[in-house]
Image (spheres, coloured by chain):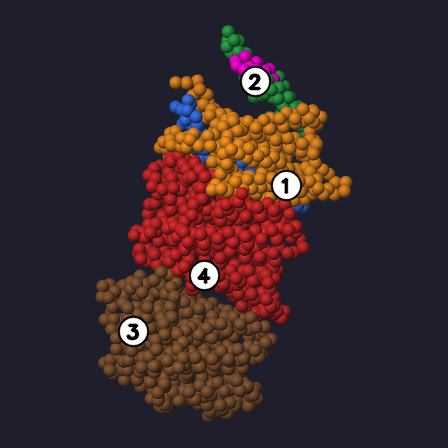
Amino acid sequence: MLDLIAAFFIASGTVFFVAGTVGLLRFPDIFCRLHALTKADGLGLALIALGVGLLAGTPGEIFRIALVWSALAVASATCSHLVARYALRSGMEGRDD
Amino acid sequence: MSVDISAMMLAIFLPLFGAIAAFLLPRAAALIGLVALALTTGAVIWLAREVWQSGAVILPLGGWGAPLGIDLRADGLSVAMLALTSAVGLLVSVSALDALKGAGQSRQRQYFWPLWLLLLTGINGVYLSTDIFNLYVMIEVIALAAVGLTVLSGTRAAVQAGLEYMYASILGALLFLMGVGFVYLQLGRLDFAGLMDAEPTGALIAAVALMFVGLALKTALFPLHFWLPAAHANATAPASALLSGLVVKAALYIVLRLAQYMPFPSEALLTLVGMMGAGAVIWGGIQALRAERLKLLVAWSTVAQIGLIFVAFARAGELGLTESWKAAALLILAHGVAKAAMFLAAGRIKDEIGHDVIRDLDRSPIRPTLAQFTFALAAISLIGLPPSLGFIGKWALMEGAMASGYWHWVVVTMVGTLMSVAYFSRVFAGFLRFDRVRAPVGEHQGWALADAAPLTLAFAAIGLGLMAAPILSFLEIGYPFGVAP
Amino acid sequence: MTPDLIYGLTGIAVFGIGLVGALCVQERLRRVLALKLCSVGAGFVLVVGAWREPPEMPDPVPHALVITGIVVMVSATAVALALIRRLQTLEATDER
Amino acid sequence: MMDAPLLPLFILLTSLLASPVLFALPERAARLRTAINLGMAALKVMLVAWLSLKVAQGVIYDLRFEVLPGLEFKLQADPLAILFIALSAVLWLITTVYSVGYLEHGPHRARFFGFFSLCVAATVGIAMSGNLFTFLLFYELLTLATYPLVIHCGNAEALRAGRTYLIYTLAGGLVLLLGTLGLWVLAGTTDFVPGGVLTDAAAQNPLAAQLLFVVLIGALGVKAALFPLHAWLPIAMVAPAPVSALLHAVAVVKAGAFGIMRVVYEVFGIETAQALGMTAPLAALAGVTIIYGSLKAITQDDIKKRLAYSTVSQVSYITLGVALASPIAAVGALAHLIHQGLMKITMFMAAGNLAEGLGVKKVSQMDGVGRAMPGTMLAFSLAALGMIGLPPLAGFVSKWYLAQGGLEAGQGWVIALLLGSSLLNAVYFLPMLHRAWFRDGAADAGAPARPRIGWMLAAPPVTTAVLVLVAGGFANAPFSPLEWTRFIVDIEYLE
Amino acid sequence: MTDPLVIFDLLLALSIVALAVASLSVRDLFAMIVLFIVFGLLSALAWVRLSAPDVALAEAAIGTGVTGALLLKTLHHLRFVAGGQGLRAGSGGTSMAPAAPVPVPVPVGVILANAAFCGLITLGLAVAFLGAPSAGPGFDALVADAMPDSGVAHPVTGVLLNFRAYDTLMEVVVLLAAVVAVWQIERGLSDAPAPVMGEVWQGFARLALPAIVVIGTYLLWVGAEAPGGAFQGGAVLAAVGLLLLLTRAYVPRPAHRGIARGAFVLGTAAFALVALLVASGGRVAFEYPLEHAKTLILLIEGMVTLSIAVTLAALFHGREPVALPKGGRDDT
């Protein structure tokens, strides 16, 4: 049962990742792409971490997974911010191909 | 608790500690450097005595023994190379004291010593190593320190040349690393002893080829020499002397060692190596004839001489490498001493005259007689005129080639010799011509202390030829290549 | 089809790609990168050599060698990059 | 008498060690330099005298040490060596005096005398070499030591000449290296042994032995100025007069001729060489060179060039004597080694004096110089007449023995050759003497009628001229060159 | 057997090769570096698949992380120097003109010939690889035998710090040589000022710093038993240095040179001294007495970690700190 739930979480997380990647490839400018990436990846990663956490055996492992998730969440948010900030400052407003 | 220190460890660790101390105390760097050099020389002498008395010595580091751990081994050949390194190194260091004494050179002074001592650590490490991966790490130590020395002067040309050198060096090392990988795939071990008697399978042949090409790149064997002339010509004089006299020898030595332990390469392969050497002799000669600057000429002559060493190596014939390696080893020693002397002398000439354009050497009213004399002596050894060590090496080369009927190698050697006469005589003409000078010639300015080191080296290059018999018998300690049948 | 076969060939391919880059590329930064690719390729070959069929433990020695190789490579890269930066500065001052 | 086994080494060291000291002396220290030069030269003459005495008594000197396994650096003092050493020691002393005078105010004297000393050391080494390997060592040293002397003037012309000289002689040296290696591979030794070391090898592999002969003679022929390898010699005339004198009389050319002797007598052995059929072509080549040199000399107006071509011709007498393969001819050849040296050095020093004192460098300017410089010209004339072969001068003696040797060997053409050559000698020397003595000096000579040249310039040619007279007149006295050559020939032909 | 994993392996292998090609062929240098970083991370993943977690960690932290940072810094410098004073000239991050002066283009023929040549070499290597014994002989048995005497439980650490400690010492020497060379090469003030990163970044750094320190120390500590160790830990700690430098929480000053030098040589010196000093009572150099082996190894690892962290950060910083001119800009 736990396995099934875990599989469900992981699968849906993967779907978000795919969606985010499609967005990265298809969206017209850098801000839209960032939007797709951060939103999708943040959720996707959380879901996957949740799934994997359910599968993990010991509390220690669960703790580490949580740690990884939180670190990644903070890092990815900061990175996206930096990219957006840089793009804004160097005058990349409109479409960029 | 007393510490058992072996001479081999000292030969590697003394320069390392010296480098650390020189880096920590930049003001005292020169003093530390000289002391470290002197101590290292002492350790090498100690080691030589040990080897002379009891044959090849082995030190299993960590007490594990060869396949798992790393062994250090010293036999005649390695001690000879160590001796070359410390002797040349010591003299070059002495002359570096003078060459780097300028007011604007404090930065060079500060960094020369740690880099050079690190270089020495790497070179000594190569000569004592018996493990191919360890050799990889050592050549990287050498590469980084050598690049640092190349760009010591900080000029644009030097940095450019240093970058090219760096690329070539990294690529060579990586090719070598890939070869190490293939050796591991095939044999599952990395020590020299494990390589012996191995069946030459595809993977092993690939490994030999990769390592050889990598080392050829490092030692600048034609046609992989492209990086050398600029790098050696643009470095400051003591650095050039170290690079040309010692650094390329480390890679050459590894080639020698690999040939000793790897399955004997086929005759065709050896001929190919010889052809590359011949190409180097001729191309290096042509470029040296065309070179406009003294140091560039000397650098191109290094390319040619390296080629000659490979020719010596390739004329193995029926006996295999049992004899030809001696000729190669003698030429390596000869070139190390003579080229270091020549670069130092060229540096002195450049310092005194203010430029090193060969065409205008004879316009200068200043004639640094001793440096010119040193240059000429070194040239005698490099050309291979008796009784220099270079002559003995050439003799050994040609004798073997003739005995096995390889006349083509004899011809290559003779052509190389004639070309070296031709390109060095360009320089002599510049030294000895006087009718283009406007001002009165200030000649014979007495004895400059700065000339002492190069002059000693040059005399050694000539005089060692008369000691070839003891040198040869020392080289044979531990029978690096087995006994001639 | 075992991982060692797949990744071994991958490593050799990466090495070859790096080699092409090292020989053909002119841009300085890209050449450094090409060399880095070569080193990864060589690392692959060693790691693959250490690999054993899963229940067995892999051979730790090549792993140690590759770690050493990585550190050595980053040192070499740092020096090469420093040279590139310095050269760029010198060229820029020369042109001004 | 004391026994000193290291005597040959000391003789070598007198000049070898003098050289670095001379280099190191500052340019100003002229007196000290002269003292060292003359002192060492005199010391050497004494040591050589001592050595000759010991050798005549049958003492064998043999110094050796191993350079490579089986390959030795070997000095020996056999009678043939003594002959050459004695020549170089005596002439070095005389030439040194002359050079000191000649270069009194010239530039680069430290360098000059350093290399000068080295040059003599090389010559002595060549003489005492106990094997071809050692010979090669000194042969190359000689090349290197003479090069800076040849280009001493340091102008473009000198450097061009120097380059030609260097290319010829170093290429020759390289070929000699090849030959030495060939000998080493073929015979397993490079020792000089009366009777040769190649008898067996030549029997087994005559083609290789013949090839080796050609290579060795070709290599030595460069310095011996055998036609067609002589081109460097006339060009090298840009050198200062004492250098030319030394080059022609003792050092370079003679080293080549001496080497040919060693190779024919003690590497191949005269019988083996004959058996290989190599002596006749060599004799023919020598004959061609003799005639060619004389013919070229006639057409030269420059005094030194005329003398140079004369050397080309005269030195080949030695080769001829060797190649005739008869003991008597050999005596002639050896005697000529000495006699030609004495005569030629006289003439060059005299020519140098003419150039120094009167600025006369061409034959056409020689009108009346005899009256301006009688001593010098007297010496010159004596030497010239000796060259032509007028009895009882030195040249006559050697030519006489050569001719007899030719008869003995059944080679009648040699007589004709010698007569023809003497005639040609007369054709190019007599006009010079005629101009010098019997024509009035041209008013435009510009030089003072009696130029003052120092005794250091004037005395040497006169001394050597006297020696020419003595060597011819007292040819049969003990320790005369001729007597000594008989001693040698006994050794070479007894084996 | 394990089909899904084979497919995964194949896909991963293909993407690695594709990324390698892409990073060499993409025109923009920034994109090149990004692609390379992705390439490095995927390679690390592949090495995890080959049960080499230590290597994967090292590659991710040093081979990709630090190298990527170094490349980006260099690119920043190049663009700044090439573009004069401002970075605004181009359209920003993605399509700048090449940084170096445009070199003479290599003729296509030469490139093709080179490529063909390298292709042949690669093909030959592949053939040789296929011919080599798979999972052939190795050190497995030897290491297994020697592990009890090594003083540590994790085999890779045992190899690195005991069996082949000499190699590792020399590796640290390579790092030292690199930092000496870099200090020697670059001089004076930086040409390109550090980019201004904004408040979010500052906040992130403040948050991340302690976490990274903890992680780095943990990696070092765990190295004795499990994947991790001095190099990985050092690289993670170096990230602290990078953060400090980038946030300008720490600005190198000339007065710090001595300390920096000391930190660079600390690892090498400690390692070499221990290696030499244990050689007594019949032991040779590098032969730790068994009862102290673990302590000594940890000591060495600690020192080496510190050195590696400081050295890598210094390599990133690039130059010896010099005195600021009055009113001058920051030297970063």
Where is D323 relative to B53, above or below? below
* Label 3, label 1: how far apart the Cα atoms are: 75 Å
| Amino acid carrying mark 1 in the image | Gly
Residue E232 sits in which quadrant? top right
What is the crowding at mark 2: few (fewer than 14 residues within 10 Å), some, or many (at least 20)? few
Marks 4/1: CA distance? 43 Å
Residue found at x 61% / y 68%: B445
* Pointer 4 and pointer 1 on the same chain: no
Q: Which residue is mark 2?
A: A60
Q: Report how far apart the C-alphas of labels 2 and 4 lie in the structure.
A: 71 Å
Residue at horizontal 49 percent and vertical 42 percent from the top: E281
* Residue type at tag 3: Pro
Chain containing mark 2: A
Residue located beneath label 1 in the image: E262
Residue underneath mark 4? B464
Q: Chain of mark 4?
A: B
Q: CA distance from mark 1 to mark 2?
A: 38 Å
